[in-house]
Amino acid sequence: MPAHGKVNSKAGNGSRKVPLRREISAGGIVWRRGSRGVEVAMIRPRGRASWALPKGHVEKGEDAQAAAIREVREETGLEVAGARPIGDIAYIFSWRRKGSLVRISKRVHFFLMEFKGGSTERHDDEIDEARWLTLDEALRRASYADERALIERAGVELGAPPAITDD
């Protein structure tokens, strides 16, 4: 998956208009309180060095909240109790598919979710690793600034603002 906020606007020689496809995704910030304070679940997608929040496409007939809960379960192996909106991220990236360049405008609806059960060992095969991290660890590892901002917001909403910030 391309980096958030990266845009490649050239379509080969620049003379053709690049088709724009809109996508809606949903994801979650799963949290729990433990001996190390508030922790959040993060993922490292297969074959990538990046760390991110779990997220994925909203399927036909599914609302964003249901998609977020499903994606969290698939990508982290975790079950959650409830989900409340915490913010959206929007970005544009280009993708080469079957030899043609396509520009994708993506909006991701994120939800704050309390951990109920499950194990990060039960993530799906699209993920190399799912792990619990303290808020500060999550901020250091999160590969995307827009997701770091949501993690900070979650800490504040949970009464546990992280010690480090993205200045």
Image (cartoon, rainbow, N blue to C red):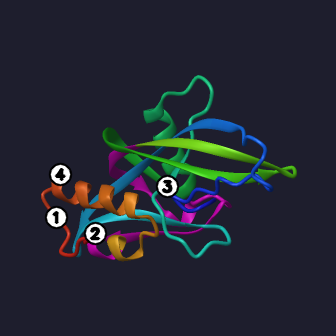
Does 167 sit left or right of 75 as displayed?
left
Dot 3 or dot 2, earlier in sequence: 3
- Which residue is identified by label 3? 54
The amino acid on which the numbered mark 4 sits, given as a three-letter code, is Glu
Q: Is residue 126 above or below residue 116?
A: below
Disc 4 marks which residue? 157
The 10 Å Cα crowd at callout 4, few under 14, some 14 to 19, many 20 or more, is: few
Residue at mark 3 to residue at mark 4: CA–CA distance = 19 Å
What whole-number distance in Å separates the C-alpha atoms at marks 1 and 2? 8 Å
Marked residue nearer the N-terminal end (4 or 2): 2
Q: Is 35 within the magenta?
A: no
User: Is the C-beta separation of discs 4 and 2 under 8 Å?
Assistant: no
- Left/right of residue 30 with respect to residue 66 in the rendered view: left
Residue 124's x, y, as percent?
63, 58
Identify the amino acid type marked 1. Answer: Pro
Residue 31 placement: quadrant = bottom left
Pointer 1 or 3: first along the chain: 3
Q: Are marks 1 and 2 in contact (CB under 8 Å)?
A: yes
What residue is at 48 percent from the left and 63 percent from the top? 52
Q: Position of residue 89 (x, y in %)?
A: 42, 47
Q: Which mark is residue 161?
A: 1
Q: Nearer the viewer, residue 99 or 18?
A: 18
